[in-house]
Image (cartoon, grey):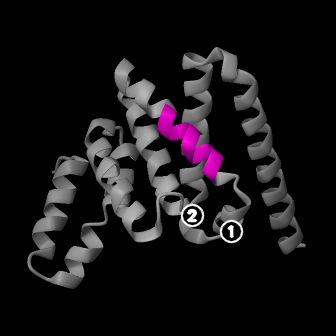
Amino acid sequence: RVPRAKTNAQMLAELDARAGNDERLKRIVLKRFDRARVLLSSGDAELAVPLFRDHVPVNARNYGPEHFYTRRAQGMLGVALWRTGDPAARQEALAHLRVAIEAIFLPANADYQDNLYSLKEVRDQIFAAYLEAVSRLDPAGASQALAVAEMARGSATQDALTDAAVRA
C-alpha cells in the first residue's frame, strides 16, 4: 500500500516538529525565502505571499533596501502575488516586479548574477512574471518589457556560450 502524498504545508509542519528546540536545525528549517519558494513552486502562491512579504524587510534591514537580495525577495513577492490571480494582488505585483527587474540590471549587482545563490531559476521566474504582468496590465510599457526580454535573452545566450567554452 502506497502512503498518500503530503501537502507542502504538511511537510513544512513536519520539518518544524523535527527541528524541535534544536537552534541549529531551526535556523535551517525556518528560512522564509526557501520555504516560500517551495510553496510557490507547488502552486501554493497564497501561502508563499506572507513569507515573501515578511522576508523583504528582513533583507532590507540586513543588507539595505537597495541591495540585490532585498530586491530579489521583492521580485519573488511580486511573482507570488501575480500567481494568486487576484486583480488587486496583481496590481501590487507589478510594482514589486518592476523594482526587482531594475535592480537585477544595475551594474552594482552584476557580481550577484554569477553567484550560485542568486539562483538563475529565481531570476527567470521574476522575468517571466514581469513580462506577463506588463503585457496584461501596462500595454504602454510593453516596449520596455521587450527591452528587458532582449537583455535576458542576451544574458542567456552569453551563459550558453560560456558553458560551451568551458566544455570545449
The answer to whether 4 is drawn above or below residue 141 in the figure is below
Secondary structure under the numbered disc 2 in the rendered image: helix
Please indicate, yes or no, whether residue 2 appears anywhere in the rendered image: no
Residue shown at the point (45%, 39%) measured from the top left? 78
Secondary structure under the numbered disc 1 in the rendered image: loop
Picture coordinates of residue 79 (x, y %)? Answer: 46, 39
The amino acid type, in three-letter code, at marker 2 is: Ser
Picture coordinates of residue 121 (x, y %)? Answer: 57, 53
Answer with the quarter of the image where residue 12 lies: bottom left
Picture coordinates of residue 168 (x, y %)? Answer: 90, 73
Q: Which mark is residue 114?
A: 1
The amino acid type, in three-letter code, at marker 1 is: Asp
Residue shown at the point (62%, 52%) measured from the top left? 103
Q: Is residue 166 magenta?
A: no
Picture coordinates of residue 21 (x, y %)? Answer: 9, 79
Range shown magenta:
95-103
Give the dominant element type of the magenta stretch: helix, strand or loop: helix
Q: As rendered, which of 2 and 142 lies closer to the eye?
A: 142
The answer to whether 77 is drawn above or below residue 120 in the figure is above
Please indicate, yes or no, whether residue 45 appears anywhere in the rendered image: yes
Q: Is residue 133 left or right of residue 102?
A: left
Residue highlighted by disc 2: 118
Q: Is residue 55 left or right of residue 118?
A: left
Asked if the residues shown at circle 2 and circle 1 are in contact, with their CB atoms under 8 angstroms apart, the answer is yes
Residue shown at the point (40%, 63%) measured from the top left? 59
Q: Is residue 99 magenta?
A: yes
Q: As rendered, which of 15 and 137 lies closer to the eye?
A: 137
